[in-house]
Image (cartoon, grey):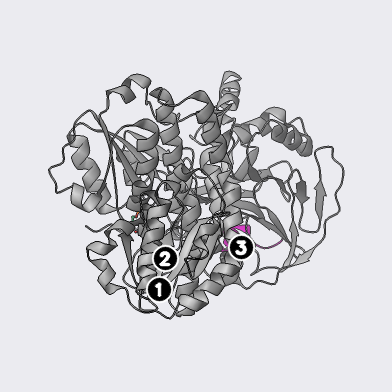
Amino acid sequence: MCGIVGYTGVQGASPILLEGLKKLEYRGYDSAGIAVINDGVINIAKVTGRIANLCEKTNDGADYPGVTGIGHTRWATHGAPTDTNAHPHLSNDGRFAIVHNGIIENYLSLHDELTSKGYHFESETDTEVIVHLLEMYYKGDIKKAIIKTIARLQGSYALGVLCVDEPGKLYVAREASPLILGVGVGENFFASDVTALVSYTRNAIYLDDGEIAEITPDAINVFDCAMQTISKKITRIVWDIQSAEKGGYDHFMLKEIMEQPRAFKATIAPRIKDNEIVLDETDLSERYLKSINKIVITACGSAYYAGCAAKYTIEKLCRVPVICELASELRYSDPLIDNHTLLIVLSQSGETADTIAAMKECKSRGAKTIAIVNVVGSTIAKLADHALYTWAGPEIAVATTKGYTTQLAVLYLFALYMSKKLGRIEEERYLQLLSSLKSLPKKIQDTIDTNSKIHKIAIKYYDNRSMFFIGRNSDYAVALEGALKMKEISYIHAESYAAGELKHGTIALIEEHRPVVALCYNESVMEKTLSNIVEVKARGAEVLALTYKGNSQIVSQANDVIFVPKSETLFSAVLEIVPLQLLAYYVAKLNGCDIDKPKNLAKSVTVE
Ligand code: F6R
């Protein structure tokens, strides 16, 4: 996710900006840059890749003198990770440079307007419209130009501005993206994250939405769009650097679990316009969708399990067969794929070697490919005919959480979109499902809020060497991911089983006090799963059931019950998985495991 920093004072700005950017590296980024004012000129250095490259390019900042500057780490959204797309961006007249976090949703119309007025665009970013708007509105008063500019922006921004006409000053503005001012002595700072500030100052001002600040080495003036001064409180930062990076959480995994409501919303919201699902990134015409006779979903690990969960939703809504195949199997299977197959590839990193190979194999047989990917410009995104991005932001913990739920978010959108295009859904039902989809971020949050109860349950179950996760139909798909989460971070053997299959073998392993996590959300198979619970209890198992609020029939059967909000079963996987992520997290923590970096695992599996 992008990060921004700014400095004005008496010291060389560049080394301070580079240090600040290094502190933001943990957020994930693909390019970086700084801009510094010196002798009435803005000098900009930008690189693709690591901050180390930027240090090399700038001679650790020494080749970019000046006491006022801004810096940025970019996590590509609009436009590939390239030097040109990296920030800062410069106005055509060289007067302004800006850095920006967030997304400008109306950038296309602004781009057209500015182009027609003669402004020249260097990059493919949404951000660049801002710097040209500043130039357009500047008539000698920077504050006025900023106010006019931000009035034109829709979306989110934390904005840092440099202007050659006021060389010792920084300007910042915020809307729906974090921005913190660091208050020093004879020097001041800004950053998107306290991590970049704590080495220099622990006095911070947290800007709120709609606020703008003018920053000099000796003063910070915060005001609103009516130029009314706002008095702000200085807050003392108490976090140490490490916990600041994790937003105060003990582990990235927990932070990322907590980010799921926001990530899910960020993934669906821009794609729902006036109750229509807009998948602009694809060209899935009605004609094309009618021509396909099957969908093949391929991926590895959790991404594969996201596909397994979405299979139920897509088949139910679209009545098109969906085959989920592990990429490491599909590629060697001489697959039955042709130009009537739509291939959906899921990958958080976009770099998984087996997934890439399976995709190439299927492409060569004529399949159209859609990649659902988190990392912009990754190999899978580039190889696909169309990439649909999950806007989860960087995922640092090795065990995926928000990557999985945002993949489901895109797959749910896709299922609804396709069923409508195929004419397989009534308008009333479509609107009902769309509204249910939009309610999920809040329900994910409500699920997260049961955190302390799950912690207590983890205390009861953590001291076991083996567990079972059972469910039927869509619940079974979630059981697969729940068991994977448990085993990969806690090293407890966790076996997921289709509940109806237990009696064909696995039930032999059920013994006194063996924990069985039973997923009972899907009403169409509820009675059947309940009888499986009775079977394992009869053999001494301790049953932890997971169901929707109000389903009291489980209470008398299970030893413990986790309730999650009621929703459409078609979308329930995202709600069911959250307590299982938390359970795995707390069990691993109680067992003293290295949660963010489990043994033998890597975040991006680039080997076959
Ligand atoms: C498990 C996990 C892995 C990944 C798998 C695919 O928590 O993270 O199973 O899901 O390695 O990775 P991507 O999605 O990057 O292709």
Q: Which one is earlier in the sequence, the residue at label 1 or at label 3?
A: 3
**337 drawn magenta:** no
Ligand 1 is found in the corner quadrant, namely: bottom left
The residue that appears at 34% across and 42% down in the rendered structure is 311
Q: CA distance from mark 1 to mark 3?
A: 32 Å
Viewer-proximal residue among 15 and 148 = 148
- For marks 2 and 1, the one nearer the N-term is 1
Residue 304 vertical placement versus 382 (above, below) = below
> Front-most of 150 and 270?
270
Q: Which mark is residue 517?
A: 2
Could you tell whether 381 is left or right of 96 in the image?
Answer: left
Task: Name the chief secondary structure element in magenta.
Answer: helix
The residue shown at (27%, 59%) is: 501
Locate residue 207, reporting x and y percent: 74, 52
Distance between the alpha carbons at the discs numbered 2 and 3: 42 Å
Picture coordinates of residue 291, whole percent (x, y): 27, 23
Q: Where is residue 387? Give x, y as percent.
A: 38, 37
User: Quick one: SS at disc 3?
Assistant: helix
Mark 1 Cα shell of 10 Å, populated few (<14), some (14-19), many (≥20): many
Q: Which residue is mark 1?
A: 490
Front of the two marks 1 and 3: 1
- Relative to residue 270, is residue 573 depicted above or below? below
- In the rendered image, which quarter contains the C terminus? bottom left
**Callout 1 secondary element:** helix
Q: Secondary structure at mark 2?
A: strand
The reply to whether residue 34 is visible in this rendering is: no
Q: Which residue is mark 3?
A: 196
Q: Is residue 135 left or right of residue 584?
A: right
| Residue type at numbered disc 1 | Ser
